[in-house]
Image (tube, helix red, strand yellow):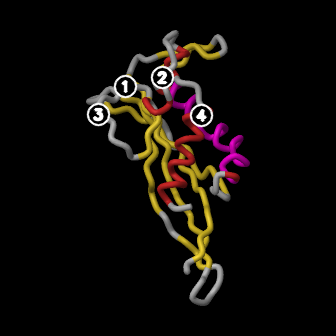
Amino acid sequence: MDTITAINTVRDSLRTNLTDPYTYAGATARDGSLWIFADEPNVMPKYPQIEIKKVDNPSTILTIGPNYAEREYVYMNVWFYSKNGFKGTISATEYKNAALVEYYLSLIKTTLKSQASTLFTAGVKCYAHLNTTTVGYDAETQLYFGAVSIRVEFYTVCS
């Protein structure tokens, strides 16, 4: 396991387990690779979308000697963006703008938490939700946005 693999494992879990907001607006679902990204080029962005950005990657040495073991932490923000005016109906409730972002931030958090054993099997040995930001709005781009800050862990042995 390495940092890129850890981030991609989180990305792939979201791609597999989150419902595309387009379906709540009455459209056909997009493939997860078209709306959930992890620092990948996105030349034709269509919103809503998710972007995972690495924040930090500290580690702790667990043993001594030439083949020492490390516990690595990957901190990342899982950003959700939605265009002004996009709305979807979820369980008979209409969500749009800040409310849609808030709904998806909660969904991201609960989805990753419910996938803890799958993440563990894939090599991500710990998942922790650290923070959920307030929802912001950029008038120039007309985007509502917010992030779920998470930490994942894995172990390596240096040889």
Q: Position of residue 23 (x, y in %)?
A: 54, 16
Q: Position of residue 96 (x, y in %)?
A: 49, 19
Relative horizontal placement of residue 116, taking residue 61 as reference (left or right) = right
Q: Dot 4 lies on which element? A: helix
Check if mark 2's residue and mark 1's residue have beta carbons within 8 Å. yes
Say which label, 1 or 4, has the lower sequence index. 4
Nearer-the-camera pick, 12 or 74: 12
Say which label, 2 or 4, has the lower sequence index. 4
Amino acid type of the residue that numbered disc 3 sits on in the rendered structure: Val
User: Which residue is found at the position 48% from the left and 16% from the top?
Assistant: 87
Q: Quadrant of residue 71?
A: bottom right
Q: Which mark is residue 81?
A: none
Amino acid type of the residue that numbered disc 1 sits on in the rendered structure: Lys
Q: Magenta span covers which residues?
A: 99-120
Q: Which residue is mark 3?
A: 43
Q: Dot 3 lies on which element? A: loop
